[in-house]
Each structure stands twice: as structure tokens, then as C-alpha cells.
Amino acid sequence: MKNKHAFGLLQATNAASGVSNGVVMITVPWIVLELTGSAAKAGLLAALSSLPGIVVSPVVGGLIDRFGRRAISMFSDVMSMVSVLMFLLVNAIGELTYTWILVIAVLGACFDPAGYTARKALIPNAATASGVDIDSANGRHEGVFAIGWMVGPAVGSACIRWSGPMLAFAVTAVTFACAAIAVSLMRVDDEHGKKVAHHEDGHEPFFLSLREGFHALTRDKPLFTLAIGFMFLSGLYMPIDTVIFPTYFESIDNPTGLGALFAALAAGMVIGAFAYGRLAAKFSTSTLLRLVMIVSTLSLIPLVILPPTWLFVVLGFFAGLSWGPFNPLWNSIVQKRVAPEMQGRVYGLQMSLLYAAPPLGQLIVGACVDAYGLQPTFVGVMVLFGSFGLTFATTPILRKL
């Protein structure tokens, strides 16, 4: 099915979702720190918000392969919009307490994995419909999402500065609505998953289909190793983004600096992601993975000295630039090694692994910041991140990718 606008509409959805999540990423920790002044509570919030993804993501993968990628993407964006509107509703009719923030944030986190996974699964459909090369499509997709992440924190910090967190939540609700509308307008062939997931005499047992997805991932040892390694890297890195950076910038009352840092990280990722097509033509998969791990680690290490904001921004840009090719690279690996009718389930399982480690890391880091101070905790996290990242980058089995 040819539709020259399909890929553009997917990217409109992608950008709107990226902006929405970028705003939420800066706004929710900020409001918790303003309300409680506790890095441990900010860490608890981040950890609890990650937990739904562990359980939801594999189920989402099965739903994508059963009911279609567009349907799940639209449902996710609509429900994410509803969860954000709950912040405004509770604040309007009562007091937005820490407990309410926890409840709403965890509810919203139940739907984010669905949209992210469904959009990834839609890349081949939209690229084929619009006549876009698949490697180029993967790079553009992740680059556009990174643009959303770049714009989102800047929008969130501006809203906080101008009017407060409630304006940021209102803007987020609007952008989630735009994302749902854009994907509803797509016209792509999204039938193969539904045909495979349903037998002529009824329905394949749903959890049997999930088990088949698990087997597809675990049988591919290099792909499974990549997923496990990234799980541990996320467990070490996400507490930096969600606990250490917000705590530091809130302590110096500089939301603009925090927004600039996240914007710089995203700006680097935009350039790195868009460069993926050319990099993939020049480097092998294993070589490109090693470059991503090594350069991103070296870019992050100097941040432990808590430098001036401008240096945070510069180093954040280079960290994002070096990490930018990773997501399109991962997409391409799955598309080349996994059958199309299984990709939703494999993406979902990978997302589950991605969500598995950060909650523990966020709890530990938040508690350590309160107990030992921000900078000593940051140093400890970066020692672990650097050691694991450089070891993982040289793992022999990844050469088989």
C-alpha cells in the first residue's frame, strides 16, 4: 500500500510524543523536589514509574502483533493524555500531594511503553508505504524522537519558569492529543501481525504467543546479549537523568539549566541518529556499538565534578551525539534478525528488560544522595557505568551481530 504521507505522519506522532515525554521528564521530578525537598522521594517516584514497563511491555508486544500497530499507538497516546490531565484535575479540585503524584505518574507509565513500542514496530510499514530506505527510516525516526526530547525539556522548564508546573502539564496533554490524531491519519498495511496472531478456527492463546516472542529473542544469543547489556547500562544511567541531574539543578534553583542540559543531550542524539544511515554504511555493527559505548562514557565522566552549566551543556551534547546512533542501530538489528510477525513481541520484551534495572538504581541512588551527598554518589555511579560500559563494548559475542 503506497502512501507518501505515511512516514511523515508517523514522524509527526513521534515528535509530539517525544515533546510530551520530555516535558513530563523535567516537570514531575521538579514538582516532587519542590514539594518534598527529598532526592530519595524523587528516586522512589522514578523507580515506581519504571515498574509498570516491566510488566506492561511484553503484553503490549503481543497486543501489537494481535490488534495492529496503529491501534495500540493511538490508544497509548489517548490514555497518556488522560493521565496528564489528572494532574490538572486533582490540582484544581484539591491538593496535589506526593501520594497523588505517585499514583498519576505510575498510571501514566503504564501507557508510555505501548506508544513507544508501537511506533518502533510501525517504522517498516510507514517506510515501505512512503518508499523510504529502512536504514534511513530508522535514523530519521530516532532523530525526530530526539528532537522531541530536545524541545520537551526546554518547553517544560520555560513553563515552570513562566507559570509553574500546571502549564507544563496542559501543554503535554495537547501534544499527546496531536500524536493520537497524526497516527489515526496514517494509511499503511498493518495486517500481517493480526493474520499470524489469529488462527482460522479461533484465536491463538495470547500468552502462548508471548512465549513464542520470548523464544525468538532468547534463541538469538547476540541479540539477547545486547538486550541484557543495555538493561544494566540503563539501570546505571537512568538514575543520573532522573535523580542526580534534577537534584543538582533544583538545589541551585536553575530549571533553565536543567532544561538546557536535557536539550543538549537530545540535540546531540538528533545529529547522531540522523547520521546513522551513513555510519551503518561505513562501520560494522559491532564496531559502531563499541564507538557508541566508549565515546558516550568518556563524555559523561567529567560531569562528576559538577562543572558550570555551560560545560554541563557542552558535555551533554557530546554524550548525546555519541549515543544517537544506538537506537536506530538496535531497530535495524531487530528488523533484520526477527520475522515481521514477531517484531512487536520482541520489541516489547526488550522494553521490559530496559525497564527492569532502573527502578532499583533510582532507589539506591536517591537514598545515597540523601545519605552521602550528591557528588560522592555521582562519582560512584559513573565508576560503575564506565567499567561496565567499556567491558560490555568488548564482549566477543556482539561481533556476531
Image (cartoon, rainbow, N blue to C red):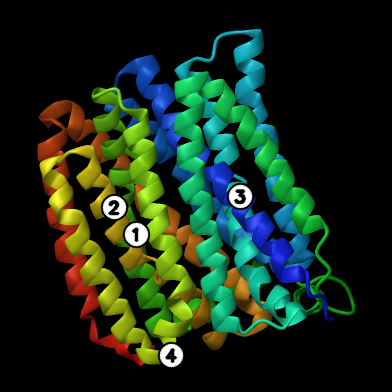
Whether residue 114 is visible to the viewer of this picture, yes or no, is no
Q: Which residue is mark 3?
A: 17
- Determine which of the numbered discs, if any, sits on residue 58 in the image: none
The mark nearer the N terminus, 3 or 1, is: 3
- Outermost residue to the top: 94
> Residues under labels 3 and 1: Cα distance?
19 Å
Circles 4 and 2 in contact, beta carbons < 8 Å? no
For numbered disc 3, what is the local secondary structure? helix
Task: Tell whether 2 sits left or right of 39.
Answer: right
- Determine which of the numbered discs, if any, sits on residue 320 in the image: 1
Q: Give the percent coordinates (x, y) of residue 52.
A: 52, 45
Task: Tell whether 46 sits left or right of 312.
Answer: right
Q: Give the percent coordinates (x, y) of residue 67.
A: 78, 64
Mark 3: amino acid: Ser
Q: Which residue is mark 2?
A: 316
Mark 4: amino acid: Ala
The mark nearer the N terminus, 4 or 3, is: 3
Q: Crowding at label 2, few (<14), some or many (≥20) Cα neighbours within 10 Å?
A: many
Quadrant of residue 371 within the rendered picture: top left
- Determine which of the numbered discs, if any, sits on residue 281 in the image: 4
At a point 18% along the width and 71% down the height, the residue shown is: 390
Closer to the eye: label 3 or 1:
1
